[in-house]
Amino acid sequence: MKFGGTSVEDAKAMDRTAAIVGGRRKKGLEAIVVVSAMAKVTDQLLAAAAAAGRGDKSGALAISSRLRNRHIDTATELLDEQRFPALQTAVHQEFDALDDLLRGIAAVGELTARTSDLVVSFGERLSSRMVAAAFDQRGLNGTHVDARTCIITDANYGKAAPQEAAIEAKLTELVLPLIEAGKTPVMGGFIGSTVAGITTTLGRGGSDYTAALVGGGLHAGAIEIWTDVNGIMTTDPRICPDALRVKSISFEEAAELAYFGAKVLHPATILPAVQKSIPVWVLNSRNAENEGTKITAVAPKCKSPFKCIAAKKKLTIIDIVASRMLMSHGYLKAVFDVFDKYKCVIDMVSTSEVSISLSVDSNERLPEICEELSKIADVKMEGKKALICMVGEDIRGHNGIAAQVFTAVSHVNLRMISQGASEINMSFMIDEEDVEEAVRSLHKYFFANPDETIFDVDARVPATSRA
Ligand code: ADP
Ligand code: ASP
Ligand code: MG
């Protein structure tokens, strides 16, 4: 069971989390709990690290001090007099260590990726301790596990790759005995460590990934991702308030969706679960009775061509034009080798007689990439682009889908178009500023008459007129 930042954002949220886990235990199920940092804490830790890196010691310590107060206040509300002192001491010790670290970074005036991971790890280290203590007080036998003892990764700081065999061995050695002893292990998501014991992180949103690694590693019966929406929705409800809950979706569809911007799941989450055929659920910790979304191996048949619309912003399009060389042997390889060298992920590719257009979502190394590409071609970059991705396994069976999609967004300027080889997504690039308008138009067009076996249409009926 993984609880995201909003599901542990304050004492009340942690209380709800305890009630949800208690409900599972009452049914005779055993739970391992993975928690994110309290809502917004990761952003604030990153801001503190950045301030320290600029040499702004007092700015960094001010952020840390506000975070300390928030955690202590939450612990005060959460625990009784008997249990509070031990947690209070632990929280202060963590913040003292964080402050020392920030002072050190400020003194050097340089923030490395490795040190940034260490700073940001405090969020999950603290939240998991607090939730474990809360579970203990609420009769759930909560026991804190430092995730860094189990989640073994490589040393690619900021986006470390988990080593699944090592993780499985550690989970079996350290976590399984706790479950067998009737305890509820609570660990922080997102963080791990190298074999040498250096702290790493799995990338933003990485707690989902931890949940899948733990669920996969211990062959769980199910993985539950508890968040602040009723499940996977037809699109981001923040963009489109009348988005509908998708009752069930296939692994493949969910993976496309996550990769192409649906924040509700980390892109890599699904993989460890797919490999072991473990069902994944996305559920709402503020509305625990809701059925949520079930992610299944095979997609149930759906009358609509699409299940969801995802949008990913902050992309750059790179146009590479080399009229002399395009069709020559080895040219594409030479281009892709440059992206490979800088570990830059490409989202979309389209080629014409004389040019290749690519979209990429990481901007840090782009100047170097462009410089290298310039040796073999003319290169042009255009930032502030967004990708809209329409996902559904039933695209295959529908004729004329592209025409419908482009009719729905006929007023928006399309920059690149692609229909994935997997035939379960149709994507196009537009200007970032057109995203909201495009998503709403597409949603209106394709979800006006939703298939009731797949989508929760009850949510559309105003609460007062519901039976
Ligand atoms: P958590 O902290 O629980 O991991 P996140 O903020 O990472 O939560 O993800 C949940 C958010 O994802 C939702 O509040 C919603 O705004 C956003 N989101 C984007 N696309 C979708 C979608 N298709 N379905 C549901 N939520 C989505
Ligand atoms: N706390 C981390 C983040 O905000 C990881 C997570 O919440 O999944 O990115
Ligand atoms: Mg998340």
Image: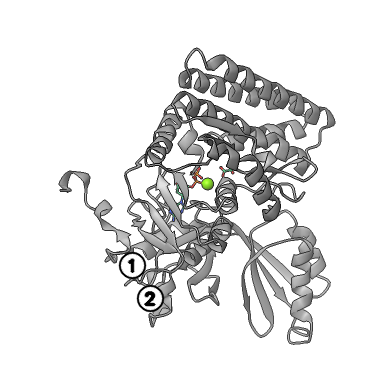
Q: Nearer the viewer, residue 293 or 445?
A: 293
Task: Say whether residue 111 is left or right of residue 361.
Answer: right
Q: Which residue is mark 1?
A: 445
Residue 394 x, y percent position in the rendering: 40, 74
**Sequence-first disc among 2 and 1:** 2
Tell me if residue 161 can be seen: no
Q: Give the alpha-carbon distance from disc 2 to disc 1, as whole Å.
A: 9 Å
Tell me if residue 279 can be seen: yes
Q: Are marks 2 and 1 in contact (CB under 8 Å)?
A: yes
Label total for image:
2
Q: Residue furthest top?
A: 81
The kind of residue on which mark 1 rests is: Tyr
The kind of residue on which mark 2 rests is: Gln
Residue plotted at (59% across, 25% down): 67
Q: Nearer the viewer, residue 222 or 264?
A: 222
Residue 13 x, y percent position in the rendering: 43, 32
Instruction: State which quadrant residue 392 falls in.
Output: bottom left
> Ligand 1 closer than 8 Å to the CB at disc 1?
no
Residue plotted at (70% across, 34% down): 119
Q: Which SS class for mark 1?
A: helix
- Label 1: how many residues lie within 10 Å, few (<14), some (14-19) or many (20+)? some
Q: Nearer the viewer, residue 234 or 218?
A: 218
Task: Say whether residue 57 is left or right of residue 391.
Answer: right
Task: Say whether residue 464 is left or right of residue 459.
Answer: left
Residue 341 x, y percent position in the rendering: 79, 64
Q: Which residue is mark 2?
A: 404
- Label 2: how many residues lie within 10 Å, few (<14), some (14-19) or many (20+)? some
Task: Say whether residue 284 is left or right of residue 127.
Answer: left
Q: Which SS class for mark 2?
A: helix
